[in-house]
Image: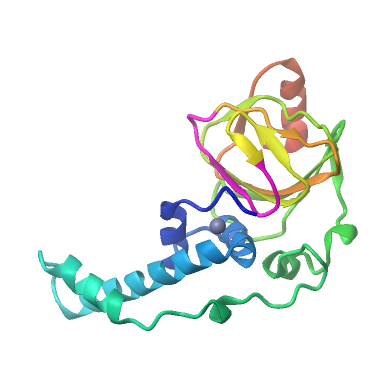
Amino acid sequence: MINHHLSDEIVWAYATGSLPAGHALLVSCHLELCQGCKARLAEAEVLAGAMLQTSEQQKPSDDMFDLLMARVENEPTLSAGAYLAEPKPEKGVPSALWDVLGHGYNGIKWKMVGPGIRQFILPIKSSEGESARLLKLSPGFVTPEHSHHGSEMTLVLQGSFSDETGRYKIGDVQEADEHVHHQPIADTEEDCICLAVTDAPLDFKGFFPKLLQPLFGI
Ligand SMILES: [Zn+2]
């Protein structure tokens, strides 16, 4: 069961097509795994469509919100089936990610970036400063403690990890910004594979992390 979902801001940005490629990929992967966020996206899309229509037809007025809500309520609700994902070519690999990789996790050419951590930079066209990568943490791997200059979104694809903010399992999303200072630790049963998207370099603390940072390339 998924406990950590997309924020309203991210759902809205996705609905209006304003997310950069890496973030959009992460959201698509979560949506394949989460019925609840699919429903939230459907609502946001209806609202975004209504706003677009309204802005084309008239200038915004005090009645605009009422008008929008009336349109949203009249819109036929989408059945859950309308958003069912394509069949997954390999168990556990979201189709959106498969489309980028062209294969499953087994075919990934991981690069070792330190003891117990491997990464694969995803070949997607990102906006300036955005970076999207898969990370594979060995069981029990302790990530260097770090904070952020910008934002970091992480989606768990296999295994699980925990940090000061909770436990993250398959499908869970973590959104961290410059106020979050954390140290994710992979759970011990199996490798933890995550999709991580950052829009600015991570700010690692301490000696070992400083060595690690150039290896990460972030
Ligand atoms: Zn969700």
Residue at the location (74% across, 36% down)? Answer: 216
- Residue sitting at the far left: 62
Rendered-image quadrant of the N terminus: bottom right
Any part of residue 17 in sight: no
Question: In the rendering, at what x and y percent does residue 121 appear?
Answer: 74, 51
The answer to whether residue 141 is magenta is no
Residue at the location (61% across, 61% down)? Answer: 25
In this rendered view, identify the residue nearer to me: 55 or 28: 28
Question: In the rendering, at what x and y percent does residue 193 appear?
Answer: 77, 48
Residue at the location (76% across, 72% down)? Answer: 88
Rendered-image quadrant of the C terminus: top right
In this rendered view, identify the residue nearer to me: 116 or 119: 116
The stretch of residues the image draws in magenta is 168-180
Residue 51's place in the image compared with 186, above or below, is: below
- Is 126 positioned to the left or the right of 54 in the image? right
Residue 97's place in the image compared with 211, above or below, is: below
Q: Main secondary structure of the magenta part?
A: loop
Question: In the rendering, at what x and y percent does residue 132 appear?
Answer: 66, 51
Any part of residue 22 in sight: yes
In this rendered view, identify the residue nearer to me: 148 or 130: 148
Residue 192's place in the image compared with 211, above or below, is: below
Residue 165's place in the image compared with 21, above or below, is: above
Within the image, what quadrant is residue 116 found in? top right
The answer to whether residue 172 is magenta is yes
In this rendered view, identify the residue nearer to me: 11 or 217: 11
Question: In the rendering, at what x and y percent does residue 195 appear?
Answer: 69, 51
Quadrant of the picture in which ligand 1 is shown? bottom right
Within the image, what quadrant is residue 96 found in? bottom right
